[in-house]
Image (tube, rainbow, N blue to C red):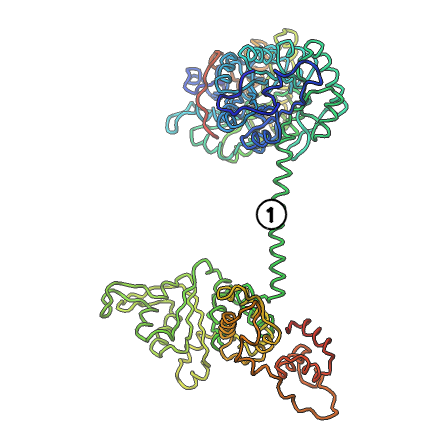
Amino acid sequence: MRSPSSSVRPSTAYGAADWLKGNDGKSDGKPFLIGAAIGTGMIAKAAERGGADFLLALNAGRVRVMGAPSIACMLPIHNANDMVTAFASAEILGKVSVPVVFGASAFDPRADLAELVGRVTADGFAGMANFPTSIHLDPLLQAGLARLGLGFEREVDMLRLAKQAGLMAIGYVRTAEQAELMADAGVDVICLNFGWNIGGRESLPSTVSLDEAAADASEIFERVRRRRPHIFCVVEGGPIDTPENAATVCQAGQADGYIGGSTIDRLPLEAAVSDATSEYKSVNVLSRRLEAIQDAVLGQGRRYGLIGRSPPLREVVQLIDRVAATDMTILVQGPNGVGKELVAQALHAGSRRAGRAMVAVNCAALPRDLLESELFGYEKGAFTGAARTRIGRFEEADGSTLFLDEIGDLEPQLQAKLLRVLEAGMVDRLGSNQSRRINVRIICATNRDLTQMVAKGAFREDLYYRLNKMEIRVPSLAERIEDIPLLVEHFLQSTVPAVNENVHSVDGPALRALMAHAWPGNIRELKNVLERAAILCDGNRIGLAQLPRFAETSRPAEPREQVAGAPPPSPADSGAQTEREWILDALRRHRFRRGAAAEELGLARKTLYNKMRLYGLG
Amino acid sequence: MQGVIVDNPASPSAAAAEFVVLAPYLAGLSPEAADIVGMMPIGSVNETLLAALPVAGLAPPRKLVAAVFLCDPFLSGRRLFERLRARGVSGVVNLPTTSLVPPGVYRQALTAAGIDPGAELAALGEARQSGLEVMATVASYDQAARAVEAGVATLLFHPGTPTGEAALDLRLVEGVVASIGRIRSMPQRPRVALYRHPGFGGRLAPAGDLVEDVLDWAVSAPRVGVEAASPQPV
């Protein structure tokens, strides 16, 4: 037998390279052969790794991996021999160590078989098989082909030539007569094919049962072995769609092996690809579940960086969700450090403009003249030092969102220019008399009371109403003190590791101290306090020792004066709207000392703890 | 009308005919081989067709009908039809065709894979929508009835493959005459062209008298080792 390819590494296993030579004619000396009828390099290599003794490069394998049923290999959609040569040469020959057998078509009367055998030999194939083959056709078509000299006998002739050329030959047969013809021609392997394989999405009905296949194999192989006792007899196709079925037919039919086609590529591939895709699809579902869980724990504003579940923050998040997708001008109000820019970013991210970056300008950070040129841009020579034309932030934000922070600090002259932009949608660069149309969504923010400024004449009323089509008021941290534990946890994970990666928690007393603080600097202050405490922390838990400024406030406060013998206030008595607020008020009064709060509320400590857990208060 | 089936649109036979069925996949095949191995994987019918078509801009034969294989699982019909139109093709005919596959296990398997005359008729409908004239190859009255029902107005009647046995072939011709007679009496009155298979010789003459058009074999003679034109991807 020929070596499959000079560049192929030698096989060390007792594979097909050896089984012909090694066969001594005794059945117990034969290996059980596994052939893989394949159509791509990837599947060829996988089959080799799986232990295939030889590979059959078939056009059927190729059309299968292209998504068509195996039977498409019989159609005039390609030249079978050219197709096999192309993919096997490019993807398989020289890349596997087991013999590669060329699936050859003898249908074409214009093809010279000797020339074909010569080409297959020169290309480095180890053998030839008659596939695609006339055995799949009905008797009438087979007879028609035979009349033309293009039938099964031509396939036998082709394999005879292959043997003469020193190639291994595998004869596909369906009947005993065909098997005998092939055996007489000297083929090495008889492959009894039971028709197109069942199973899988592209399966075809089998006309043969497993029992019939086993009976056929038994009878045909017996006849063949009477003529050629040493010949290898293998089975393929039809009802054999699992290794168990193959074992049944092989055992009952005394087969020496099995050739797998769609059973080793399409069927497992379909199942594996389908399963893998399904698993990745599940990842998405799991990810959505995880998001939902995170939302439940950290609040729905988490996706905007707004951490917390307090009612005031929930209102902000609901407003963002409601107005983000609109082009409405929004005024974001709130004290410094509450996350007004986060709100602006959330509004931009939820809009159709999200594909472009939001442009942000702090109106308080620049002197008036500089701010004017920053916002509106200028033409070359518009003023001393204007060496070149520069577009302003309005033009830069064309098609996107412009966030004007500290809008209350805008000087009256610029207020007028801003009003014109808002009214006309046009912007004029300094030094230019040409107006430019822009499409910008404006979001403003301020910590000042614009209504008071309007009343005092410090802010244009018309501009105020232009800007304040919708107002979002971001609560101070003092208004949502119950969010502090979540915020602390958030900063411990997000920013604290940058200053001290060992710190991963804040102990109870320290947390209560943080919750008792008034937080005039709001979330920004909380973040700074935590980072500073983490720097001072030697262990992995921040305690009051790292928060000296807060230790004072953590001392027990004087209990509120209570009328002796009077019953503890109830939610209704306290005027609180909900039990949660009733408890929170008490906790605030006692600076989150739970014992004192429980006592005031007339609750057992354990009951208070449970309610706090229920309401997310610690 | 007198038509010819050719493998080369520039052949003298094509120039003399009133309509031409261009089937370059048949180059080098005998009429008998064409019937059977024309449906085998000896080349891509459609890619070979595109390679053989006149270059756009040159005058094609009077009426050029392209023989296309419409059961290619990788075929984008609309794209092929647009390319054919752009190259001066006026119509298409489903050749080779599954209509010539005799009943049996093989045809059942093809049908189970969606490779059958019904699929070809559906593709012909798409060709018609693309602005091409369509001609359906049929080999029996039943196939003709299904084609006409699908809206096909022009049929190419294929008499089947001669067996070489005189008595048997005579019976085949009698069947052809009877089928064409029934088709002629259909209320839709489809136009019928008869493929005058050379294997039947003059025995098909009575059938030829029943139809408006005839199509004769004018493919270049069989040669071993003939190289077809380089196929073009469809």
Instruction: Give percent across and percent down for residue A212.
Output: 76, 22
Residue toward you, B202 or A39: A39
Label 1 marks a residue whose chain is A
Instruction: Give percent across and percent down for residue A589.
Output: 62, 84
Quarter of the image where the C terminus of chain A is located: bottom right
Residue toward you, A206 or B106: A206
Furthest residue toward front: A538
Q: Residue sitting at 60 percent across and 55 percent down? A: A287
User: In the rendered image, is residue A520 in sight?
Assistant: yes
**Residue at the disc numbered 1:** A280
Q: Amino acid at mark 1?
A: Tyr
User: Residue A388 is drawn in which quadrant?
Assistant: bottom left
Up-down relation of residue A4 to residue A262 (above or below): above
Instruction: Give percent across and percent down for residue B78.
Output: 51, 35
Instruction: Give percent across and percent down for residue A301.
Output: 56, 67
- Badge 1 marks a residue whose secondary structure is helix
Q: Residue sitting at 45 percent across and 84 percent down? A: A452
Residue toward you, A456 or B181: A456
Quarter of the image where the N terminus of chain A is located: top right
User: In the rendered image, is residue B2 in sight?
Assistant: no
Furthest residue toward top: B166
Q: How many marks?
A: 1
Up-down relation of residue A181 to residue A502 (above or below): above
Q: Is residue A500 left or right of residue A205?
A: left
Up-down relation of residue A548 to residue B40 (above or below): below
Q: Residue sitting at 32 percent across and 63 percent down? A: A391
